[in-house]
Image (cartoon, rainbow, N blue to C red):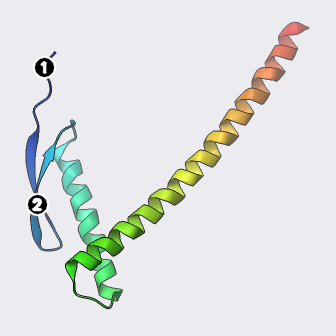
């Protein structure tokens, strides 16, 4: 089985051009949408930040995205725990019914 070829995609984020080389299959339009989202986030943060330094804006954006990711992960973990608990509860109830 052959390894999928990596392919470059050119995007622009915060007035800088980047060539993204994909190692995994991902639609080009999805990569462009992600780049646009990062660009929009950086511009939003730059509008309220007290710096014009693009590196600082990028770091602040990364921190915001990391916080968002952490919150989403916590929510998913809580929901997974609840689902596992319910599945165990339903499994026990089903076992009780089947024993009768």
> Taking 20 as reference, is 73 left or right?
right
Q: Dot 2: within a 10 Å radius of its alpha carbon, few (fewer than 14), some, or many (20 or more) residues? A: few
Q: Is residue 16 above or below residue 98?
A: below
Residue projecting furthest to the bottom: 50
- Looking at the image, which is closer to me, 55 or 26? 55
- Looking at the image, which is closer to me, 90 or 64? 64
- Looking at the image, which is closer to me, 61 or 29? 61
Q: Dot 1: within a 10 Å radius of its alpha carbon, few (fewer than 14), some, or many (20 or more) residues? A: few
Q: Which residue is mark 1?
A: 2
Q: Position of residue 79 (x, y in %)?
A: 63, 45
Q: Mark 2 or mark 1, which has the lower sequence index?
A: 1
- Residue drawn 68% across the image and 34% down it: 84
Q: Is residue 79 above or below residue 53?
A: above
Residue projecting furthest to the right: 100
Q: Position of residue 67 (x, y in %)?
A: 47, 65
Q: Secondary structure at mark 1?
A: loop
Say which quarter of the image contains residue 42: bottom left
What label does residue 34 carry, if any?
Answer: none
Q: Position of residue 29 (x, y in %)?
A: 19, 49
Q: Which residue is mark 2?
A: 18
Q: Is residue 11 above or below residue 53?
A: above
> Taking 91 as reference, is 24 left or right?
left
- Residue drawn 22% across the image and 87% down it: 52
Q: Position of residue 85 (x, y in %)?
A: 73, 35
How many angstroms separate mark 2 from mark 1 (CA)? 27 Å
- Residue drawn 32% across the image and 91% down it: 50
Which image quarter is the N terminus in? top left
Say which quarter of the image contains residue 35: bottom left
Which image quarter is the C terminus in? top right
- Residue drawn 34% across the image and 67% down it: 62
């Amino acid at each position: 089985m052959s390894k999928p070829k990596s392919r470059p995609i050119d995007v622009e984020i915060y007035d800088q051009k980047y060539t993204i080389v994909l190692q995994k299959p991902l639609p080009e339009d999805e990569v462009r949408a992600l780049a646009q989202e990062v660009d929009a986030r950086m511009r939003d943060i730059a509008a309220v930040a007290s710096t014009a330094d693009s590196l600082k804006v990028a770091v602040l954006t990364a921190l915001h995205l990391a916080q968002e990711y952490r919150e989403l992960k916590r929510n998913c973990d809580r929901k997974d725990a609840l689902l596992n608990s319910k599945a165990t509860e339903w499994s026990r109830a089903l076992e009780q019914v089947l024993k009768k």
